[in-house]
Image (spheres, rainbow, N blue to C red):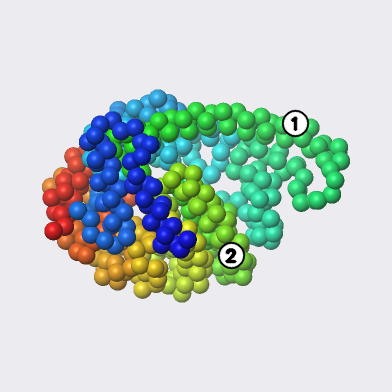
Amino acid sequence: MTPEEKRAERLARWMSTSGIKFKSPEAKKKYKERTTRLARALQLQKPDRVPCILPAGNFAASYAGGNLHKAMYDYEFLQKAWIKFLKDFDTDAAMGAGMVPPGRVLDLTDYKLYKWPGHGIPEKALSYQAVEAERMKPDEYDRFINDPSDFWLRIFMTRIFGKLEGFKNLPAWRSFEEMSPSSFIPFGLPDVQLGFRTLIEAGDEAMKWAQAIGVVNAESQALGFPALAGGLAKAPFDTLGDTLRGTQGIMMDMFQRPAKIQEAMERIVPLAIESAVEMANATGIPMVMMPLHKGADSFMSVKQYKTFYWPTFREVVMGIVNEGIIPILFAEGSYNNRLEIIGDFPRGTVAWYFDQTDIAKAKQMIGDTCCIMGNVPTSLMLTGTPEQVKEHCRKLIEACAPGGGYILAGGANIDEGNPENLRAMMAASQEYGLYK
C-alpha cells in the first residue's frame, strides 16, 4: 500500500463507530462529526467548522476539587475528574489522562528524571518538572551507538532509577555461544535481585494505573470524544539533548564532537520510527504527537538547526508519514526563524502545532502543505476574561481558517484557571469558524 492508502485506511478505522458502546445516539453522532472534522482539517480540507481542542492539561484535576498529586496517587479520583471534565465541556478531541504518571511507580523505582508533587516539589504543585543531568557521558557515545538496548539496560536505567542500580552488574547479552551456569551468577547478586523485585512490584502498580487510564479512554469514546494522539515520538536531537546528554552536554557536543552527535542521531532514527508506529498500531489512533524542545529559535541558530536538528527530525517524520500516520509537531517556544524550512513535507501529511510562533505568518508560508494548530496564549487563558479569549480566537480563525487546514488550540496547556475561558474558546470556534 502507498502512504496515502495507509493513511486513508487508518483514518477510516479511527472514524468508524463500529465496536464502540456509545452512551447515546447523540454521542455516536458527535463522535462521527468530530473525527470527520479533525480528519478533514488535518488533510488541508474544509470541514464543517474549525475544530477546537481545549488546552486543558491537568485542568481536570483542579476543576474536580483536587490537584495533580491526588490524580497521580488516587486512580479513582483520576477517572472521575477526567470524565467529569468531558461531561461538562465541549471539545473536538479528548487528550486523555495518559500524561498523568502513576506516583507510586515513580516512588517504587526511585525515579530521577523528574520531580513531581510531593517528591522534590510541593505537594500542591500544578505539574511535574524535568531534572537536567548528563545521563550519558561524553565518552559513551560509541557504547550507545553500538548497542542502544544494552546501553539502556545496563547504563541508562541504573542512572534514572535508583532501585535499579544493580543492573550495572548484569552481563552484556551479545554472545551467541552456548550459555553456562556461570551466566546466571549476576542474578544471584542482592542488588540485581532487588532491581527485578522492584520491576515486578512497579509493574503490578502500573497495571492498576493502566486500567484506570483505559476506563477514561473508553468513557471518552462512549461520550463521543475521539482521542487525538495514539503515541509519542521525539526528534533525535531532543532524545540526546533532553534525556541523555542534557542541555549543557549537547551544547558542548555541537562544538566538540559534532560527528558523534550525527552518528548517534542516525542510530536513533529507525528506533524512533518503530516505536511511534507500534504505539499507533496498538491504540488504533492514526496521529502521533511529537513535542519539540531544542529546535526553538531561542536555542540554536538557523545554521545549527539545518545542521543538527532538521535532517534526522525530518527522517523520523517521513518514516512515520510513510506508514500512514499523521505526526502532530508541537513546536514549543517560537519557530519564526524556521518557517522557510519546516514546510518541506508532502501536502496534508503533518500538522504543525504552534506555541509562540507568528501563526498568521506560518499560515502564509507553510499553510499550503501543512495543517496549522494553535496558538491561543496560555497567559491569556489564565488571566484574560472570556470576552478577551473569544475575541483573540476570532482573530486567529480569521487569519488561519481560510481554505481549511486550521485547528484552534492553545499554545500550551493550563492546569488551573477560569473554566469559562475554555468555554469561550469553544464558543468562538462554533460561532466564527463555520465554513460556508
Task: Provide residue 419's location: percent of width, then percent of height.
Answer: 22, 38
* Label 1 to label 2: alpha-carbon separation: 38 Å
Q: From the viewer's perspective, is the residue at label 1 or at label 2 nearer?
A: 2
The image shows a total of numbered marks equal to 2
Q: Residue at x 37, y 52 (%)?
A: 11
Local crowd at mark 2 within 10 Å, few (<14), some, or many (≥20)? some
Indicate the secondary structure of the residue bearing disc 1: helix
Answer with left or right where residue 117 lies relative to residue 161: left
10 Å neighbourhood of mark 1: few (<14), some, or many (≥20)? few
- Residue type pointed to by label 2: Glu
Q: Which residue is mark 1?
A: 190
Q: In the rendered structure, are the residues bearing label 1 and label 2 in contact, judged by CB atoms less than 8 Å apart?
A: no
Give coordinates of residue 401: x percent, y percent: 21, 61
**Above or below for 416 versus 298:** above
Q: With respect to residue 195, does 147 lie above or below? A: below
Picture coordinates of residue 156 (x, y %)? 63, 48
Q: Which of the labelled discs sits on residue 157, or is there none?
A: none
Residue 94 pos. (x, y %): 33, 41
Quarter holding the C terminus is bottom left
Please, what is the three-letter code of the amino acid marked with disc 1?
Answer: Pro
Residue 97 or 430: which is nearer the viewer?
430
- Which residue position holds label 2? 266
Q: Residue at x 50, y 62 (%)?
A: 319
Q: Residue placed at 50% from the left, 69% from the top? A: 311
Taking the image as shown, residue 418 lies to the left or right of residue 184, namely left
At mark 2, the secondary structure is helix
The answer to whether residue 69 is seen in the rendering is no
